[in-house]
Image: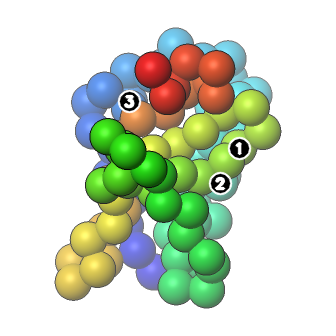
Amino acid sequence: MYQVRLLDAATQELENLDKPIVRRIITRMYWLAENLENIKRLKLKGDLSAFYKLRVGDYRIFYQVLEEEQVIIVHKIGHRSEIYR
């Protein structure tokens, strides 16, 4: 199982969301950590091509994977209408 680490920016974005949404996002991050090797990752394009995205309803999680360390680094969390800007 992979470890999940949130960067300060992602933590701050999470703190600004409503509690039910935060619970859904955290649950989904745990799911990602347990199932990362069994899913098809969605790679972003353009300036964000270094990241993968995970969809949680109308919210997106941008993350990177450090395979050797088995770590998922969450860079950004936000509503789909704002996160790509």
The amino acid at mark 3 is Thr
Mark 2, secondary structure of its residue: helix
Q: Position of residue 43 (x, y in %)?
A: 48, 60
**Residue position for label 3:** 11
73 above or below 34? above
The amino acid at mark 1 is Val
**Residue position for label 1:** 56
- State the residue at coordinates (30%, 55%): 50
Mark 1, secondary structure of its residue: strand
The amino acid at mark 2 is Arg
Q: Is residue 3 left or right of residue 16?
A: left
Residue 73 quadrant:
bottom left
Nearer-the-camera pick, 85 or 23: 85
- State the residue at coordinates (45%, 80%): 1
- State the residue at coordinates (59%, 46%): 26
Q: Which sits earlier in the primary sequence, circle 1 or circle 3?
A: 3
Residue situated furthest left in the rendering:
68
**Residue position for label 2:** 28
Q: Position of residue 65 (x, y in %)?
A: 33, 67
Answer yes or no: do the residues labelled 2 and 1 have beta carbons within 8 Å?
yes
Q: Position of residue 10 (x, y in %)?
A: 38, 32
Q: Which sits earlier in the primary sequence, circle 2 or circle 1?
A: 2
Q: Is residue 46 left or right of residue 32?
A: left
